[in-house]
Image: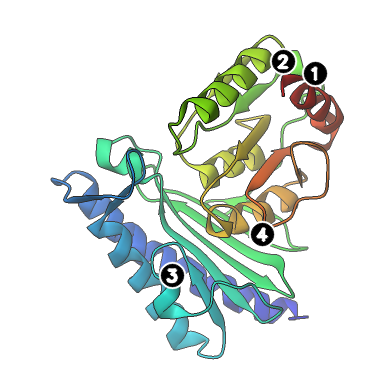
């Protein structure tokens, strides 16, 4: 397992890469967008692809022996299979739909797994200039200040974030909205910010109390956020209460106090 000095070096390089990609996102945010349609809702932009190149090129220069998994170009950069090797897992632009619409919840998400365990996480929103960072065992930070999860102890006082996802077939939409209808009676309110990574960071800094998402894009949406949540004192788990599995697209996160009550509410909503 990598020592703390090495992890700090990994984090520093990831922050530099995130800042570089963030500048590209910021420049593109207010420009006319040239969009390829990857399905009805999932929009990919030129910026998305350029940002992945920026991040991977930066990290490859520093750590040529590491593996790389990215949302856009996994085929070019390396195998999509997660191994025990140090592996950078990157979403170059989480919140592409927000980006296209000029809605400021967009971010670069850079996570590093070692032995398949998320060890380093950086999530940077260049529009709001918020940099979330975490190193396993060393705490979580927002713009250099320590953050921790909320201390809410009742569902009814909790703010819940989720996402509809990209599928628009009737069965999926009905299941999603029925679940939300059920949960709305048990929490204070629901938010859909449009970025899985930023939802996790919202849990970490206490602006959200609960989040869950089913069927998100892949490990690049969550790897960095998992480290940041756990280092802020939060818990990450399958919404049904099972242990979180990075290879399965199901995630929930909260402070430890709310977990059992949320799992029960979620199971009742199915």
Quadrant, the C terminus: top right
Residue indicated by mark 1: 154
Q: Residues within 10 Å of mark 1 (few under 14, many from 20)?
A: some
The reply to whether residue 147 is visible in this rendering is no
Q: Secondary structure at mark 3?
A: helix
Where in the figure is residue 132, as x and y percent of width and height? 55, 52
SS type, badge 1: loop
Which residue is painted at 31% across and 64% down in the image? 49
Helix, strand or loop status at disc 2:
helix
Alpha-carbon span between mark 1 and mark 3: 39 Å
Mark 1–mark 2 CB contact (< 8 Å): yes
**118 versus 266 height, above or below:** below
In the rendered image, the residue lying farthest to the left is 32
Pointer 4 or 3: first along the chain:
3
Give the residue at mark 3. Answer: 16
Which of marks 3 and 1 precedes in the sequence?
3
Alpha-carbon span between mark 1 and mark 2: 6 Å
In the image, which is nearer the foreground, mark 3 or mark 2? 2
Q: Are marks 4 and 2 in contact (CB under 8 Å)?
A: no
Give the numbered dot on residue 157: 2
Tell which of 268 and 168 is nearer to you: 168
Q: Position of residue 50 (x, y in %)?
A: 28, 66
Q: How many marks?
A: 4
């Amino acid at each position: 397992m990598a020592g703390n000095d090495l992890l700090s070096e990994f984090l520093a390089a990831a922050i530099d890469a995130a800042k570089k990609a963030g500048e590209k996102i910021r420049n593109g945010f207010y420009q006319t967008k040239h969009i390829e349609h990857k399905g009805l809702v999932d929009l990919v932009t030129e910026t998305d692809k350029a940002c992945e190149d920026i991040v991977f090129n930066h990290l490859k220069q520093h750590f040529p022996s590491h593996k790389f998994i990215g949302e856009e170009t996994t085929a070019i950069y390396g195998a999509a299979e997660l191994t025990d090797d140090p592996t950078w897992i990157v979403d170059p632009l989480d919140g592409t739909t927000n980006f296209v619409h000029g809605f400021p919840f967009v971010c670069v998400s850079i996570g590093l797994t070692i032995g398949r365990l998320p060890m380093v996480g950086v999530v940077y929103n260049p529009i709001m200039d918020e940099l979330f960072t975490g190193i396993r065992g060393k705490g979580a930070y927002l713009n250099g200040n320590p953050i921790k999860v909320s201390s809410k102890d009742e569902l009814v006082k909790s703010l819940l974030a989720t996402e509809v996802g990209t599928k628009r077939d009737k069965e999926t939409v009905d299941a999603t909205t029925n679940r939300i209808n059920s949960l709305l009676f048990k929490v204070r309110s629901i938010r859909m910010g449009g970025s899985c990574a930023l939802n996790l960071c919202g849990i970490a800094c206490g602006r959200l109390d609960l989040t869950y998402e089913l069927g998100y894009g892949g490990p690049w949406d969550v790897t960095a956020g998992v480290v940041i949540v756990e280092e802020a004192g939060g818990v990450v788990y399958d919404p049904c209460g099972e242990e979180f599995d990075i290879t399965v697209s199901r995630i929930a996160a909260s402070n430890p106090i709310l977990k059992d009550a949320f799992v029960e509410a979620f199971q009742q909503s199915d």
